[in-house]
Image: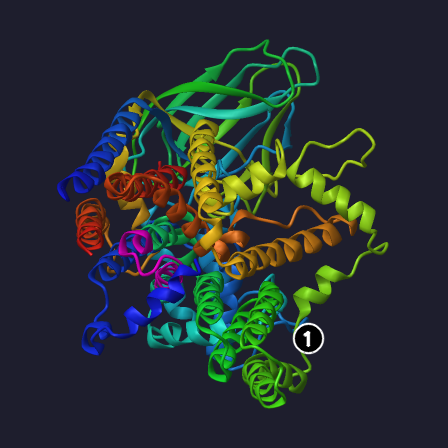
Amino acid sequence: MRSKPVLALLGVCLLGVLVLVVIGATSERREAFTLGVVPSVAVVPLDSGEYVCQAPIQMPDDAAFDRIAFVLGTDGRPGPAIDVIVQPFRAQGELGRGRLAADYTGRAVRHVVDVGHVDTDRPFQVCLSNDGPRKVSVYGNADVSARASSASMGPVPTNADIALVFERAESRSTLSLLGTMLDRAALWRASWVGGWFMILLAALVVLAVPALLVRALRDATDS
Amino acid sequence: MSELAVQDGAETTEAPVRRRRAPRALVALIGASLLLAFAWAFISPPFQAPDENAHFGYTQTLAETGSLPGKETKPAFSTEQVQAGSASNSDQAAAQRSVKMTWDQQAYDRWLTDDEKLGTKGREDGGGLNPASSNPPLYYVFEALPYLATKGSDLFTRLLAMRLVSALWLAVTILGAWLLAGEVFHRDRLLQLTTASLVGLAPMMSFVSSAVTPDSMLFAAWSLALWLGVRILRRGVTAPSALALFALTGVAIVIKASSYALLPPALFVVVVGLVRRGGWQPAVLARVGAAVAAGLAATVGVWFVLAAALSRPAAAQVSAASSTSGGADPREFVSYVWQFYLPRLPFMDDFRSVAHTIPVYDIWFKGVWGSFGWTEVLFRNRIYLLLLLVTVAVVVLAAIELWKTRAGSDWAIGAFLALAAVALLGGLHWSEYNLLTGGASNFNQGRYLLPLAGIAGLVLAFAVRRLSPARRSIAVGVVLGGLMVLQLASLSLVLTRFYA
């Protein structure tokens, strides 16, 4: 009779893992990475012809992107067209470019612009350029929000960070990102902790914990 | 429960050799629970547990300088910690769901190079006021050991070592719950396993225990104190047992001030124990009274003397929470407590709350079952509704079992455990009420109830005992499997929050 409790334990575990796998396989994510800036306030007002650049930005591993999301606010009138340009930091050339069409309205509205596929291991910058006749506000937060980069208008620092989110054209399932997530989780630990260690740990948890619980249940049932 | 007294004689005839061996079920449960807690230590990002940065800073100041933090002229954290928090983005990610940790390997490499250049000066210049700086020092003295053992390593290695050592307290917490259930359930192994499994495998227990926070040690002290209290009620009070209970209560107070809530139930145990001894003979009273005083003097007393010598408030958290801007109003306090647990009535003043619904659900219930990071990492609401359904079913089953077996129950054990719960809740509500009336925001979090995990485990075990003997072990199998699944779901939730 003692196999029934063990079967119940393992059955629940198996069912639970299956449910988690299904959820992981069906939940999709578009976000490649973010600067981690919350778009709380309008930080940079852009008049006609002005531009603001956030730099330097370093793309993490496995985080190539195709679209950039940002938040703009208008004063109630239709907003101007915005050019979005991705450039190497302190170098010539262009890594990607897109354009937000004019005539959007609203305070603190999120926009997403296709810039083409960008995949680089070098620092880059993202510039938003006002290509219309009217003023627009770019949302972000204080300069400390993204410690490694800052927003500036030409050579003039804005003492702020723009809230930028980098997205993929095609969404990926959370499950397909598992290896990447474990790699990322291994950072900011002891230097000997790597992605391989995290995978080993995950395997140990999934296999050894149920085995130990089976042992505990068998012993308690026998007693 | 009183039927246990009949079994006592039988228990004492067991062979001593057999008694010395730890039950294999307990050892296996502790092994599984520690493995999960260690996984939490590696998965949960640095400083993404409530006030972990403050607790690390406290330990660093203690380990590096030998002094306690809280000096107004100094910065809250050392240069090393500020730079680490900034480079990893842990400061910015705290409590901000849309903000992630830094994922960039190059940023880590750059930080490592900078950190090596910083030297010891960059570690010693913290020690100012932070949310933990008024805490008693016991836990931090303990945590200074892994810190010093890894002193030659970088900050994140030291933090990881501190987390892993802190997680070991979970083993003591589980042991306490196992022993507590042993007293209540005649050493029924299955019910002991049920009680201890909730304590060891509930995701919040693993998450909090594996972070750098005095809560891990606090859970252990409360778990053992609850066991000792029940043990004394069952077996009678003696001077050594009173000494042990009050020393443990004192230890809990020197870990965290919320443990003053253990004093009323501990006193209750001693008074009931003395009454049951059949009289108030001066010699017995003197012995037990001296034991109580000695237990407190050796722990809280030492801390009070030390605090006075260091010109430091010994119970700063208690006095801070007790001082109100406009004075306490009992009617208003009752209104606040009502609104915490029930919908507000039309004639009541509205108490501001961060809760979306009723605080008992949003703060206590969700916080106890799953509220990770800086409490911003939550499951979808339907998961909590499912957990609510299960919890209500368990409580109803346990209530039926307690009612049906009330004739053979020891009221004092129930009263002791209820008093411990009420005293803790009362203290937490009093603190929050004072803070709210002083203009502050909500203070309470679900994790503050986790010292009562052993009692929750007993409720679960009572529910299991309501089932027919043939079904009990299957039910325990389902409980263990369910907790394991909840653990995996919680770890996945944290992983996706910070790294997807």
Is B447 left or right of B386, judged from the image as shown? right
Q: Is residue A23 magenta?
A: no
Q: Is residue B228 above or below residue B42?
A: below
Q: Nearer the viewer, residue B300 or B392?
A: B392
Q: Which residue is mark 1?
A: B313
Q: Residue at x 18, y 46 (%)?
A: A203
Position of the N terminus of chain A, as image quadrant, is top left
* Horizontal and vertical percent position of residue B408: 45, 54
Picture quarter containing residue B117? bottom left
Observer-nearest residue: B439 or B193? B193
Identify the residue at image location x=44%, y=19%. Answer: A113
On screen, residue B403 above or below B116: above
Please state which amino acid type lies under the numbered disc 1: Pro
Mark 1 neighbour class, 10 Å CA radius: few under 14, some 14 to 19, many 20 or more: some
Is B192 colored magenta in this rendering? yes
Residue B169 visible somewhere in the drawing: no
Residue B465 placed where, x, y %?
A: 35, 45
Q: Is residue B166 above or below residue A87?
A: below
Range drawn in magenta: B172-193
Q: Nearer the viewer, residue B170 or A60?
A: B170
Q: Residue at x 70, y 44 (%)?
A: B337
Provide the secondary structure element on which disc 1 rests.
loop
Chain of the residue on which disc 1 is drawn: B
Taking the image as shown, residue A110 lies to the left or right of residue B145, namely: right
Main SS of residues in magenta: helix
